[in-house]
Structures are given as C-alpha cells and as structure tokens.
Image (cartoon, helix red, strand yellow):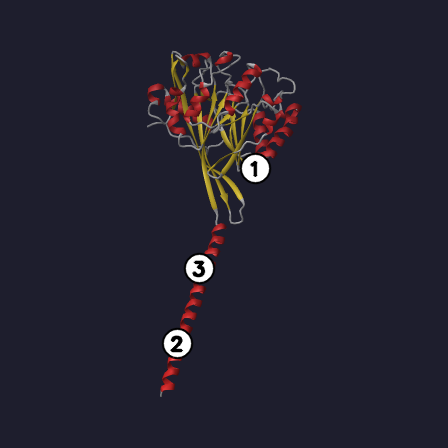
Amino acid sequence: MKRRRINKKKVILLIFILFIILGGIIFILINFNKKKVSKDNDIINSKEEKEYSINMLMVGDLLVHDRLYNAMKTSDGYDFKPVLTYIKDIVKDYDVAYYNQETILGGSEIGLSSYPAFNSPYEVGEAMIDAGFNLVSLATNHTLDRGEKAITNSVNYWNKQANVLAVGSYLSNEERNEIRIKEKNNITYTMLNYTYGTNGIKVPSGKDYLVNIWPCTGNNPSTDTKYQEYKDKVKEDIDRVRDKVDLLIVAMHWGIEYTHIPTSYQIDMANYLSSLGVDIIIGTHPHVVMPITYINDTLVIYSLGNFLSAQETNIDYNTTVGLLSTVTITKYIDKDNNTSIKLSNQNNELIYTYSKNNKDYKVIPFSNPDIKTYLNDYERVYNKYVSIITNMDNNIKVKSIAS
C-alpha cells in the first residue's frame, strides 16, 4: 500500500515535468512561427509596388530692361519682391519651380545695363528664390552680352544658392560636365539647357562652357550641317545623365521672337530630344506663348512667353501675357524594382504683367479676381491666348478665368 502511493507520486511528478517541457516546446514553436511570419511579411512588403510624386511649376522669361530695374530701386539697392506677391502664393505649393533668367545677373558692381547688352542686379535672383523658384536656365541669347566678367559673377552667384539648380552657363569644362542631381520625395531630377545662339557675339576661343549653344544657322534643320553635328554633343550630354535620374528636363532657348508658331527647328529639336528619353521640354525666347503638346510621353512646351518684363514690343498684350504651367510627376516602382515615370495633371494658367507709367509692376494670374482691376479686356485676351496654347492639342488644359 505504501509502495503504490510512492509510485503514484512519481507518476504525478513525471507528468508535471513533461507538461513543463511540452509547454516550453510550444512556446518556442509559437515564437519561431511569429518570427517566420514577420520575416515573410517583410519580404512581401519589400516586393509591394511603391509610388512617389512631386509637383512642378514653370514660367518663362525674366527680362530686365532699365525701365524695370529703375522701378525697383530702393535707397540701398533694388527690391523685386513686391512684383511677385501674387505668384509667391502659388509657387509655395510646388516642389520644383522653374524660370528662365533671360538677362544675366552680373550685378551692380560692373554697371547695370539694358537693351541691347543687358546686365541685371543680383536682387532679381534674390526675389525669385524668395518666391520659391529653385530651377533656373541661364543659356540665352543674352548670356554673352557683357562678357566673361558678367558670366563669372552670374555663375558664382547661382553656385552659392544651395537649394537652386541653375544650368546652361559654366566657368570650366569640368563644371559643365558635372552631373548635378537634385532629389525630392525620392524622385531624382536634373536639367540641361541650350540656346540657339548669342546674338552674333562669338564665344571666346576654347571656352564653349561659358554658354551651351545648339546652333541654328540656316533655314532648314535637315540641311544645317552645324545644327546636325551638334546633335551628337546633345546626345552625349543626355546619355551621361539619363540613367542617373528619374526625371530629365531640357530647357531650350529657341524659336523666333514674337511669333506664336513653332519653327521647323523647334519641332525637329523636340522630336530628337523626345527620342533620347527627355521627359519635359521647356521652351523660352520668343517672348510670347506658343502651343503645348506631347510627343510620345514627352511634354513639350514650345514657349512659356514672358514671365516678367518691360518690353515695349507689345501687340495685343503678346509680351505681357505669359504662361504658368504645372505638372505632377509620379515615380512608380513595381514588385521587381523596375522604375517608371508618369506625367499627369498637366495644367496651365495665363499670367499678366501689369504696369502703369513704368511703375507699380505686378504679375497677376488670370484666375485671380484682381485681373479684372488690372486688365479691362481680360475675357477677350484670355480666349485669344487659350486658342494659341491649345492649337496643337485640344486636350491641353488651361485654368479657368476668374469668375
């Protein structure tokens, strides 16, 4: 009887020990499975599709005549910021904001000047940066207006602006060939910039880097030897950067002034750039708006017109009505880590440069109710320029006029 009681105790103890061991095994298995599931989920999540997007804004030529900088004179310099009050409210909502610096910022130290050989104050750049602009083209027909000193001052000024990408004019071949990449919201981008010429002013020997020129020397691009030869140089530039960025922009200073129809050179250039994989082509120089279209997946803005100027060559507001274009750029990454870029939500807005007696300059969007105060004929003008912008593609959108 006593021995049986002892055996019973042993059995209970053994069962208890086995229960503890079994519990431990179950605990280990549960935690192992949790880790395995977590690891599997990490693998699945790493293969999920991802997308990122940025919004981009573009305006045209900033052309600084003496009438304009004299109106901005202050006791200790110049202040262009009040001109941009309406625009600054718009630009703040965009990740990338582009404009063309038509006249060189050589600074007051070498003497400001107007047509035909321009030189503008640094305060122009300060106002544009303050308004939110961070992408600038410098290669224009006026880049050589005041020689190497003005170019040196201009490039040094822009190189000091850490958050701004300014391209098209450089101080060495090394600087010209440097790949400058900006990034926003996991989207990398860069811009190349060329001008058709420099108003007959020759580039100093061995210093082609001072301004990027894609020469247009004839009437027909197909028979223009210089133009065709330079295509290889453009291709080299594009090949050097195309696979290193998600978004490639090319700013072209091209076309014929004061005409609303793209030339054969513009059309040929646009098709060529599109074939090389350029995503956005921005046109400047004509000082008036031109149509917008797509060539395959490439957005082509043939001319944004003037952004801000005091041009007297003004027929039916053609040099005082410009274009503010916007687009959303989305980067898609699929489960196999392949990347693609899509442009969407492309929209456009007419803007008007107002002045009175060469003073009180303002850039006003047509969507702002104040346009009615500053432009009496705003409805007719709006309809005229919308028809020009959409002439090559009826699907191009233009923001509605103020109600």
Local packing at callout 3 (Cα closer than 10 Å; few below 14, some 14-19, many 20+) is few
Spatial distance from mark 3 to mark 2, Cα to Cα? Answer: 32 Å
- Up-down relation of residue 279 to residue 42 (above or below): above
Mark 3 residue type = Lys
Q: Residues within 10 Å of mark 2 (few under 14, many from 20)?
A: few
Q: Position of residue 90 (x, y in %)?
A: 39, 29
User: Nearest the camera: 7 or 159?
Assistant: 7
The disc, 3 or 1, on the residue closer to the chain's N-terminal end is 3
User: Mark 2 or mark 3, which is nearer the start of the sequence?
Assistant: 2
- Please provide percent x and percent y for residue 342: 49, 39
Query: What residue does disc 1 label?
Result: 244
State the quadrant of the N terminus.
Answer: bottom left
Amino acid under disc 1: Lys
Q: Which of marks 3 and 2 is in front?
A: 2
Image point 38% across, 82% down: which residue?
6
Q: Is residue 403 left or right of residue 165?
A: left
Could you tell which of marks 2 and 1 lies nearer the N-terminus?
2
Report the disc number at residue 13: 2
**Is label 1 in a helix, a strand or a loop?**
helix
Measured Cα–Cα span from mark 3 to mark 1: 40 Å
Q: Residue furthest bottom?
A: 1
Residue hosting label 3: 34
Left or right of 281 on screen, residue 369: left
Amino acid at dot 2: Leu
Front residue of 141/169: it is 169
Residue 142 visible (yes or no):
no
Residue pictured at 42% horizontal, 12% vertical: 70
